[in-house]
Image (cartoon, grey):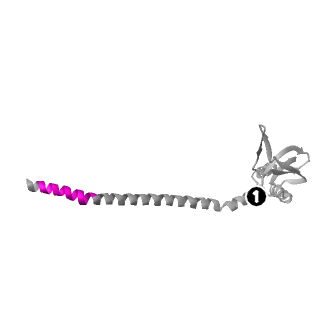
Amino acid sequence: MSLALFLTVGAFVIYFSFIRPAYEDTQKIRSEEFSRQTFTDRQSAVINQVKKLISAYQGQGELQDAVSLSLPLKPDEPGALAQLNGLLENNHVLPQSFGISVLGSQGALARRTQGTSTQSFAKPLSTMLFKIRLIGTYEDIKNFLANLETNIRIFDIRDLSVSPVTTKGSPTAYNVDITVATYSQNP
């Protein structure tokens, strides 16, 4: 009995003197490993997000070029006229006359809102109006208007009037008077 009691007390002494401190050291090492792994995972996630942002912004030059084509930095009347003429030719519509008028800036830098002055961060736009008289078939005119809508440069139709052409022996054609607006940024 005394031997059993001695072995039990010895087992407790060995447990509390050697095994428990070694177990606590093992727990500390595991917790440090877990915290380092968590830190590494978080850093990897941050690095991946930064890589995604870098790849997303690498194409910004291309985006800026596309925006500049849609909304140029200067009026560029010849370029806009060339685009309109190209659309007319591609759709087999015959231009009869062109007229160009350049309007001033749209929008003011300072606006009044309930008695307080606010500043707009958007630059005002310059507007160019093209008055075009053209002749073509219904399908050609419809295709021209569809291509005008999907053109890279922004064109808005402000006014449109259609009248039939009365000629003998020719397919049905229409006279179209159209006013098209396009915009440019003010530098």
x and y, in percent, of residue 27 in the image:
33, 57
Residue 110 showing in the rendered view: yes
Residue 34: image quadrant is bottom left
- Residue at left offset 77%, top offset 55%: 71
Quadrant of the frame with the C terminus: bottom right
User: Between residues 6 and 153, which one lies in front from this camera angle?
Assistant: 6
Find residue 60 and report its horizontal and vertical position in percent.
67, 60
Q: Is residue 132 magenta?
A: no
Residue in view at x 19 percent, y 55 percent: 12
Q: Secondary structure at mark 1?
A: helix
Front-most of residues 101 and 124: 124
The majority secondary structure of the magenta stretch comes to helix
Q: Residues within 10 Å of mark 1 (few under 14, many from 20)?
A: some
**116 in relation to 133, above or below:** above
What residue appears at the point 81 percent right and 52 percent down from the top-left corner? Answer: 183
Q: Which residues are magenta?
A: 5-20
Tell me the kind of residue under disc 1. Ser
Q: Is residue 133 visible?
A: no
17 relative position to 56: left or right:
left
Residue 16, magenta (yes or no): yes
Residue at 87% x, 54% y: name it: 94
Instruction: Residue 25: give x, y in percent of width and height.
Output: 32, 60
Residue that numbered label 1 is attached to: 68
User: Relative to 41, is 126 on the left or the right?
Assistant: right
User: Measured from the top left, where is residue 82 in percent x and y?
Assistant: 84, 59
